[in-house]
Every structure is written in C-alpha cells, then in structure tokens.
Image (cartoon, coloured by chain):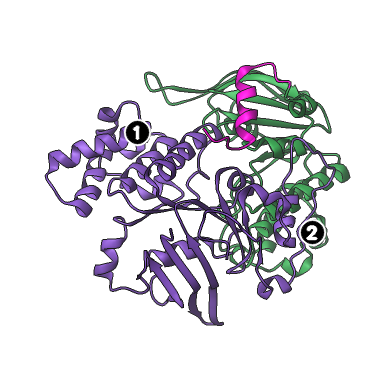
Chain colours: A green, B purple
C-alpha cells in the first residue's frame, strides 16, 4: 500500500540545512497498521507529512498503491486514497465552521454526490450521531472534535490513513474511545494505517509492525510481538522501551 | 510535620449559566513528601494548585475552612503579602517551558532577576547563585546556558531552567503542574530525578499534578485522585493498582499496556454518583501527616 525507499527530507538551505529524515525505508502492506515511534525531533512526523504532500523538499521514493509520487503537486486521486488526521483537534478544525460545513466542503471537493446522506453516514460511523451536525468546534469536547477530524478524513473514502499522534492531546479515557473507534473503522473499511506516536503502549495496541526512529534515521523495524517481548535488536530501542515503562527511582 | 494544610477548598466562577464550581471541597495535608494529584482535564487539579498560590483571578472566588502554610493562614492574603510567599516559600513549575520563559531575555538574566526579586543582594552574588542552580539541575555547561535565549535550548533543558529558577529562593513547597508532560521519556527521568533529590535532600514538599497515573504511582509517595472538583480517593502510591474507586479503576483499565494486550480497550462509564460520593481512603499508617 505504501512504500518508502531511501527517503531524505530536509529543511532550509546550506549552511543551515537540517536533514530531518535520512535514508528511511519501509513498506506497509494493504490492511496493515504500521507505527512510527521515536522522541521529538526524530523525524517521525516529518515522514508522514512528506507522504501527505505537506513538504516538498524530499528525495528518494514514496509510492502509494504502487504509484510513485513526485515531489510537487498531488492530484485529486491521491487525496482520495490518502488522508491524514492531526494531533491537536483543537487546532485542526476551523473555529467558525460547523461540523456540517467541514464535512460538506470536503465531500464537495472530492466530487461526491448525495452529500446529505453521506454526512449522516459519516457521523454515524464515528459514533457522533446526527445531532452533532450543526455544532461548532467550541461546542464539542476534545474527543468529539477528534471524531469530527476522523470523519473528515473518511469523507474521501481513503484507503490509507495517516495518523499523527491522534490521541496524545486527549485524556486517557477518551484515548481509549478513539483507539477503539480507529480499530473498528479499520476492520469495517479495510483501511491501512500509518500511525505516529511517542507512546509505545499505544503503538503496541494499534499496530502490527513499527519502525523506531532516532535523529532522522530508522534504527529498527520490528513487529509488535518483539516489542512486547522486549526483544529489540538495537540498544536505542531497548532504552526507549525501558524509559516508557515509567520512572525507576535513582 | 505538616507544611501545608487545606480544608474544604472551593474555587467558583460566576458564569451566565450560574455559578461554576471548579474545585468543590478539597482537603489534604502536605508533609515533606511527594504528593501526586491525578485527574483528567477539568477535574480541578490545576485549579487547586493555583488556588493555593493565590493565582485565581477575579471573578473567580476561592474559599476554604482552612488554608495554612506552617500554621499561618494564607487564604486570600493581600497581593503584596502573597507575593512574599509566592516564589519564596511556595513555587510553581508549569507544564510548558516555552510559555513560561521570557523569549527576549537570556536565561541567565531571568534567573538573576527572579533571585534578586526574592532575595535581594548584589548582581554578582545573584549570578553566582544562578550558576549554582543551573549546576544543581544537572546542566553541564551553565556558563553557556546563562547567555542563551530560551529558543536556543531544548524543551528538557528549558524545563530544568524553570526548575532552577523556582529553586533559587529555596522554597519549602514546590507545586509542579504537569512538569514532564511536554518532555520526551528520556529527559523526563532526569527532570524527575532532580525533583526527587530536592524532596530527599532539602526536605521540600512537592505537589505533583499529573494526568499520568503510572508515572505518579512510580514517582510519588501518596496520591489524590480528583474527579469533578473533588478528591474521590486517596492512597499510598505503590497501592494505586489496588485502587477501590470505580473511577480510578476505570482510568487504569483504559490505558493500553504492552505486557497485557487486549482487543478492545475498556471504556470508562462515568456515573453521576461519583460527583458527590464519599472519598475512599486507605487507612494510611505512614510517617506522612496526610491520610485524610
């Protein structure tokens, strides 16, 4: 579904050029859920943004469903296949657009017909119900906003969903609801996920395989069973797992 | 020994829909210990910290049967007297160093300013103290950091600088509001070690406000769990996983765990009865004065 090969992403020009991602390669099979983990600044979100077409200073190969992408513009067919959900539901929704406007605009951009019925379906899909259709973001809780953001991503009926820390701005009880919703949607719609998170437990719950990143490079690609067993190959991964288990008093 | 004693603390805000009660009768004692306060957003945990420091602005209203710092009442003191306590005797570290440091002042100037405001003294002495403080929070190259601007330091270093600044006047109590939530796990451990040492070596009292139950269970001595402005359960931190309140249990269960995979995460079903039910308290036989 997604192939990333020898991907480099950089920002700025020499001498201030920052190489945010260096020589990253991984593949994600159709229907798979793939995690990208690492500390802040490790380049995990940058990979996602390069795939989504939000950054155009990259080299290497990104191919979605077998079709290689070019650095510049993505066509409408691309955005029908790939959609993204962002970290902060408070920032990713327009404060003066109602849920109805957010969803109908997206549907119209994707050239969909029967918008009325589709909005009702989308709201049902994300567990909000039709009563939310004419609400504004400030009338929604954080979890409800993230549901709207997920509905917006689903509006295009994509096959690959890019999830950038979709629950890290939410309380743990709300996080559980959203993770369950994402799992249900993947099963129902046969979606492929690429999920960025700093929380190894969340990735362990949601994903089949994951890549561990450090300072712009992928240090290890492993499956979740290996993560659970703690049988990481690389020192860095082992340290990350140990640190995520919490605080051991010095 | 009790550093801080709080009884029936309430914080209310008038709104168009009537009076909103952010904190509804919170009582606890703080000794020379690490006291964790956990709860979800809106549970009143941060507001409790702000109320203790007198940082709730009108029209917000703070009332309490008792709010005492080492036996002296500090509830609703005039701002001038409160300023002598705030920083000097009770300090606060906020969540995000990016928003708590002045972006157009060097780190050194900010620490020196904070220190002289509280302790007075000559600039050179304050500078010496600032260097000591930066070294105390494990900053390896304090001279360089003194001259740096906040955007030139990392998040973890920014948070350590905040702690250094708060510690310069040697406070008796530190209120840390989500001090590590913006930090990576590896840096988090360092920041926690620093606070841990302060409690052990200087006998400081620490109120550690967090939404991270597992972290609090491992780091703190005692935990208060807040829900809808009230304490619903208090227990010794190592016993957190034997919590008896359904809210505490629900929070713990909703966390994904690497060692115990499940297909679906249990979702917390909130109950109205939790808003006003009794606080569940362990019979705490500890050296700490709490155990309310």
The segment highlighted magenta reads A231-250
Same subunit, tags 2 and 1: no
Q: Measured from the top left, where is residue B201 in percent x and y?
A: 39, 41
To which residue does mark 1 refer? B152
Nearer to the camera, A211 or B177:
B177
> Measured along the vertical axis of the image, is residue B255 above or below residue B49?
above
Q: In the rendered view of the protein, which quadrant contains the C terminus of chain B?
A: bottom right
Q: Measured from the top left, where is residue A151 in percent x and y?
A: 74, 53
Q: In this view, does A26 lie to the left or right of B100?
A: right
- Assess disc 1: are there few (<14), some (14-19) or many (≥20) residues with their C-alpha within 10 Å of its C-alpha: some
> Measured along the vertical axis of the image, is residue B249 above or below residue B150?
below
Inspect the magenta stretch and tell me whether residue A230 lies in it. Answer: no
Nearer to the camera, B96 or B10:
B10
Q: Residue B30 carries which label?
A: none
Residue at 37% from the left image edge and 65% from the top image edge: B69
Q: In which quarter of the image is residue A144?
A: bottom right
Q: In the rendered view of the protein, which quadrant contains the N terminus of chain B?
A: bottom left
Residue at 71% from the left image edge and 36% from the top image edge: A203
Q: Residue A127 carries which label?
A: 2
> Measured along the vertical axis of the image, is residue B86 above or below residue B103?
below
Q: What element carries label 2?
A: loop
């Amino acid at each position: 579904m997604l192939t990333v090969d020898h991907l480099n992403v950089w920002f700025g020009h020499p001498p201030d050029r920052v190489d945010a991602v260096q020589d990253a390669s991984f593949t994600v099979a159709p229907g798979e859920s793939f995690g990208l983990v690492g500390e802040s600044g490790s380049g995990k979100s940058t990979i996602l943004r390069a795939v989504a077409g939000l950054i155009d200073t990259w080299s290497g190969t990104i191919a979605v469903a077998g079709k290689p992408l070019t650095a510049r513009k993505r066509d409408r067919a691309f955005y029908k296949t790939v959609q993204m959900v962002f970290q902060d539901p408070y920032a990713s929704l327009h404060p003066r657009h109602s849920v109805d406007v957010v969803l109908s605009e997206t549907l119209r951009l994707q050239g969909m017909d029967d918008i009325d019925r589709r909005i009702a379906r989308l709201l049902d899909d994300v567990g909000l119900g039709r009563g939310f259709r004419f609400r504004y973001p400030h009338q929604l809780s954080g979890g409800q906003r993230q549901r709207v953001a997920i509905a917006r991503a689903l509006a295009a009926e994509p096959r690959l969903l890019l999830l950038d820390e979709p629950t890290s701005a939410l309380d743990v009880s709300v996080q559980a609801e959203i993770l369950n919703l994402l799992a249900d949607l993947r099963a129902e719609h046969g979606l492929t996920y690429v999920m960025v998170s700093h929380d190894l437990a969340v990735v362990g719950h949601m994903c089949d395989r994951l890549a561990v990143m450090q300072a712009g490079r992928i240090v290890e690609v492993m499956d979740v069973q290996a993560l659970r067993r703690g049988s990481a190959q690389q020192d860095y991964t082992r340290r990350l797992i140990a640190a995520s288990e919490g605080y051991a008093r010095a | 020994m009790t550093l801080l004693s709080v009884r029936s603390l309430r914080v209310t805000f008038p709104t168009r829909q009537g009076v909103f009660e952010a904190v509804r009768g919170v009582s606890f004692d703080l000794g020379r210990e690490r006291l964790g306060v956990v709860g979800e957003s809106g549970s009143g945990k941060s507001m409790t910290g702000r109320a203790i420091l007198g940082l709730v602005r009108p029209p917000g209203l703070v009332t309490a049967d008792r709010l005492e710092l080492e036996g002296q009442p500090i509830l609703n003191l005039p701002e001038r007297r409160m300023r002598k306590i705030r920083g000097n005797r009770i300090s606060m570290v906020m969540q995000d160093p990016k928003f708590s440091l002045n972006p157009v002042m060097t780190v050194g100037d900010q620490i020196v300013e904070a220190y002289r405001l509280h302790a007075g003294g000559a600039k050179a002495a304050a500078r010496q103290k600032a260097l000591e403080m930066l070294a105390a929070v494990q900053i390896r190259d304090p001279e360089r950091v003194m001259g740096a601007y906040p955007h030139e330091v990392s998040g973890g270093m920014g948070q350590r600088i905040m702690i250094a600044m708060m510690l310069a006047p040697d406070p008796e109590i530190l209120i840390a509001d989500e001090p590590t939530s913006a930090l990576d796990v590896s840096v988090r451990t360092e920041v926690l070690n620093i606070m841990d040492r302060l409690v052990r070596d200087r006998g400081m009292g620490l109120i550690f406000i967090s939404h991270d139950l597992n972290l609090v269970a491992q780091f703190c001595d005692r935990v208060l769990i807040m829900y809808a402005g009230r304490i619903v359960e208090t227990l010794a931190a190592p016993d957190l996983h034997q919590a008896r309140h359904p809210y505490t249990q629900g929070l713990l269960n909703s966390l994904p765990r690497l060692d115990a995979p499940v297909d679906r995460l249990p979702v917390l079903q909130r109950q109205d009865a939790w808003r006003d039910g009794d606080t569940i308290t362990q019979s705490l036989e500890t050296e700490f004065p709490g155990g309310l």
